[in-house]
RNA sequence: GUCCCCUUCGUCUAGUGGCCUAGGACGUCGCCCUCUCACGGCGAUAACACGGGUUCAAAUCCCGUAGGGGACGCCA
């Protein structure tokens, strides 16, 4: 059970598409902060806009969070389902004289904004309906908050520090639409209050909204939560991250070969750091992360750094787990060309493979040397290696291989070294043609390791294939 | 247009008045290691946006300027 005053944070995305990378970062920061404080992290879907919300998006958000290992406490809250509660609050404000009915049409409002803009005035609702004594029919009015226009509102933001805004900047915004559904502004406040949210951690695009929302808290006599507005993420070009500018869904990063722990590690370093630490485990992050240490400046997304961190986590990852990830990819690609015992070979060779792969795509490709059925196809570089000289060395070394009592990488390595010395060549002169014959490529894990994993029979067969062909 | 926010190497950051001739990481470029490719090791490159203050002392505090971002919906 959490302590009565324990921290409760939430992630509240709108289900209008996949969980994009910026949203994932917001969720991560909320999660880390809650865990750091020994509190709870909740998930609420802001689906009050029925026209744009889809179940697919709700599913994508959940699966995205699960993939990243960001688990939420309790059940997912649907904001839409709480609409009656939101309306109840709107009517309570109406009854208390803190809100009023407005019958202005969208056309009137557009004209008002246009006029204000050309006149150089702020584009705000002028409150003309607040003085009317009317009783419009249901469906013909919206409910607006009668905002406090005097004085100023001071926000003590955990990240932004103290921010002051004159209340004259805040207009009488809409709480309830003419169809009786709540707007975002009302719904967030009511839900955050009802869910007991103590810390609202969100993008700083919400910073100015906060001053509006604080007016609702005040009107209702509710305590305000603590706010923390984190800087947004930008694309590599320095522009706001949007769907056109690289704001991909988290599953896109999975499909590009990223490991979730690498994505999390990268994301948490955008706008936050802890001394010189770069590789930070989840446990370490929970221990260190505090929202007050988040910087104020927007950060650019850097694919190179993500790739580097991913490569690091690839090396650390469990062999079996990696095999499970790449197996379906290899199966799909090879089909009938899959060799007998491919999976066992891949698992045995995983250490050598994963050390060289930046991502799971590369890993799956490099693992093909163990998965493909004979005869191999040779890439251009491999064919270069199997030139007259290479084939000649290979032929001679082939004879030595038959004399070997055992077939392990050390024995093979020693045999090759001995052969090279006898013939008076460098080790590479025999290792490279061997690699080409055995893998069809010029790039692979250590060739003697490959030979051990392939086994004597398969290795010799591959060498003979090459000797016959070239 | 109005309001709000931001500004340290190309990028992410450390730095909270003296430890800064500004540290780390990614990238880039050398060299070493080496059977290829990676890893790793060593080294190099490169920044306090600008201008004024305050102070014995400023990347750090204050004020301007410039540049960037965000908000201004019956979207969230």
Image (spheres, rainbow, N blue to C red):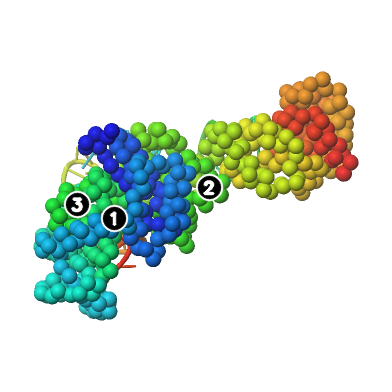
Asked whether residue A282 appears in the rendered view, the answer is yes
Q: Quadrant of the C terminus of chain A?
A: top right
Q: Which residue is mark 2?
A: A254
Q: What chain does mark 1 sit on?
A: A
C-alpha gap between disc 3 and disc 2? 39 Å
Q: Which residue is mark 3?
A: A155
Give the percent coordinates (x, y) of residue A44: 34, 50
Nearer to us of marks 2 and 1 is 1
Q: Do marks 1 and 3 both belong to one polypeptide chain?
A: yes
Give the percent coordinates (x, y) of residue A409: 73, 26
Q: What chain does mark 2 sit on?
A: A
Q: What chain does mark 3 sit on?
A: A
Element on which disc 3 rests = strand
Nearer to us of marks 1 and 3 is 1
Q: Quadrant of residue A9?
A: top left
> Which of pointers 3 and 2 lies earlier in the amino acid sequence?
3
Marker disc for residue A82: 1
Q: Is residue A298 above or below residue A327?
A: below
Q: Closer to the camera, A29 or A79?
A: A79
Q: Residue furthest top?
A: A405
Say left or right for A190 vs A52: left
Give the percent coordinates (x, y) of residue A152: 13, 58
Asked whether residue A116 appears in the rendered view, the answer is no
Element on which disc 2 rests = helix
Give the percent coordinates (x, y) of residue A52: 40, 64
| Label 3 CA crowd tier, 10 Å (few <14, some 14–19, many 20+) | some
> Which of pointers 2 and 1 lies earlier in the amino acid sequence?
1
Say left or right for A294 vs A24: left
């Amino acid at each position: 059970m959490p302590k009565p005053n324990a921290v409760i944070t939430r992630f509240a995305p709108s289900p209008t598409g996949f969980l994009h990378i910026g949203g994932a970062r917001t969720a991560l920061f909320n999660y880390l902060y809650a865990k750091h404080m020994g509190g709870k992290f909740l998930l609420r879907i802001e689906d009050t806009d029925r026209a744009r919300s889809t179940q697919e998006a709700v599913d994508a958000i959940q699966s995205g969070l699960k993939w990243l290992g960001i688990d939420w406490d309790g059940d997912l809250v649907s904001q839409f389902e709480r609409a009656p509660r939101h309306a109840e609050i709107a009517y309570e404000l109406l009854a208390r004289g803190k809100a009023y009915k407005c019958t202005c049409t969208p056309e009137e409002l557009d004209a008002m904004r246009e006029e204000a803009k050309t006149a150089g005035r702020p584009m705000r609702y002028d409150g003309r309906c607040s003085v009317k004594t009317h009783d419009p029919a249901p469906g013909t009015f919206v409910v607006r908050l009668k905002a406090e226009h005097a004085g100023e509102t001071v926000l003590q933001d955990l990240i932004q520090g103290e921010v002051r805004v004159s209340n004259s900047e805040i207009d009488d915004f809409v709480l309830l639409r003419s169809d009786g559904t709540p707007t975002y502004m009302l719904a967030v406040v009511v839900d955050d209050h009802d869910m007991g949210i103590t810390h609202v951690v969100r993008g700083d695009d919400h910073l100015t909204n906060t001053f509006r929302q604080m007016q609702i808290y005040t009107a209702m006599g509710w305590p305000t939560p603590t706010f923390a507005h984190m800087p947004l993420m930008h694309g590599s070009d320095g522009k706001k991250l949007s769907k056109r500018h690289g704001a991909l869904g988290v599953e896109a990063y999975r499909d590009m070969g990223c490991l979730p722990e690498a994505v999390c590690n990268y994301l948490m370093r955008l706008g936050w750091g802890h001394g010189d630490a770069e590789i930070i485990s989840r446990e370490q992050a929970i221990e260190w992360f505090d929202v007050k240490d988040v910087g104020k400046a927007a950060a650019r997304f850097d694919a190179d750094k993500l790739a580097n961190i991913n490569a690091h986590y690839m090396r650390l990852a469990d062999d079996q787990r990696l095999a499970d990830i790449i197996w379906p990819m290899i199966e799909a690609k090879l089909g009938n060309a899959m060799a007998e015992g491919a999976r066992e070979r891949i698992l045995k060779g995983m250490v050598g493979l994963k050390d060289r792969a930046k991502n799971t795509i590369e890993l799956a490709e490099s693992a093909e040397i163990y998965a493909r059925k004979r005869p191999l196809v040779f890439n251009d570089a491999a064919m270069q290696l199997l030139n007259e000289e290479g084939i000649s060395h290979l032929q001679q070394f082939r004879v030595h291989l038959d004399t070997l009592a055992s077939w392990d990488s050390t024995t093979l390595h020693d045999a090759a070294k001995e052969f090279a010395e006898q013939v008076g060549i460098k080790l590479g002169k025999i290792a490279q043609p061997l690699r080409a014959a055995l893998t069809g490529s010029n790039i692979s894990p250590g060739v003697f390791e490959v030979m051990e994993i392939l086994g004597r029979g398969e290795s010799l067969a591959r060498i003979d294939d090459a000797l016959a062909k070239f």
